[in-house]
Amino acid sequence: APQFEGMLLPAALRSVDAAVGRTVATPVLEGSVVSDRHLAPRTRTGVDGAVPPGMRAIQVVADDVLVPEPGSVVDVLVTFDPGLVPPGEEATVTAVRGALVLGSSGEAGLDGATSRVGVTLLTDEEGARRLAYATANGIVTLALAPPEDSCCTTSSKPSSSESSRG
């Protein structure tokens, strides 16, 4: 709106037309100012547009979980066979913290739960490796996390603190 023009940051988009046809790459709260940082370049579309450099989109399948909405942030827990876990070690561990949900497939039941759901998550390269191992060797569970815990940014590489979180 013209009355707010002087209050907008230089990177803020000035019109809806500037965003049409572009993929939202990071969550945007309703009513927030949208900038180029929130959107993928025009040359990248769909899920490709939501994967920043240094990050990976990976699908996990979980049983008996709530179907998370795109834009949600989740921690991915994996439970290994207790008989195969060394004494003193936890059978359930966090494989990835703060993964951004890009999409999900599965039908929610009346109570919001479903028996099996595929969820496409955005995480860093190490997180993708951990998720691949988790889905191949354990039972995957998703836990909703606050948006502030998201590991995902539009920067070219995750920071060292983000990399160590997964």
Image: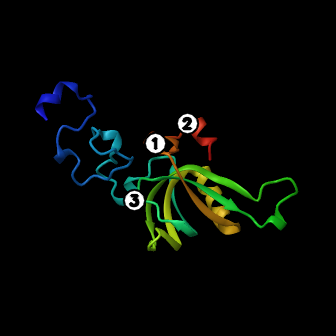
Secondary structure at badge 3 equals helix
Q: Earlier in the sequence, mark 2 or mark 1?
A: 1
Figure disc tally:
3
Q: In the rendering, which numbered label is found on residue 153?
A: 1
Q: Position of residue 148 (x, y in %)?
A: 48, 40
User: Circle 3: is it few (<14), some (14-19), or many (20+) Cα within 10 Å?
Assistant: some
The circle on residue 159 is 2
Q: Which residue is mark 3?
A: 47
Residue 10 on image: x %, y %: 26, 29
Three-letter code for the amino acid on which mark 2 is drawn: Ser
Sequence-earlier tag: 3 or 1: 3
Q: Quadrant of the N terminus?
A: top left
- Residue 54, position in %: x, y? 51, 46
Q: Residue furthest top?
A: 6
Where disc 2 sits, the SS reads loop
Residue drawn 22% across the image and 25% down it: 7
Q: Is residue 98 above or below residue 110?
A: above
Q: Which mark is residue 54?
A: none
Look at 51% across and 70% down and name the residue there. 117
Circles 2 and 1 in contact, beta carbons < 8 Å? yes
Which of the marked residues, 3 or 2, is nearer the chain's N terminus? Answer: 3
Pick the front one: 137 or 87? 87
| Residue in the picture at 28% in, 33% down | 11
**152 relative to 6, above or below:** below
Q: Is residue 121 left or right of residue 89?
A: left
Marks 3 and 1, how far apart at CA? 15 Å
- At x 29%, y 45%, the residue is 30
Above or below for 6 versus 158: above
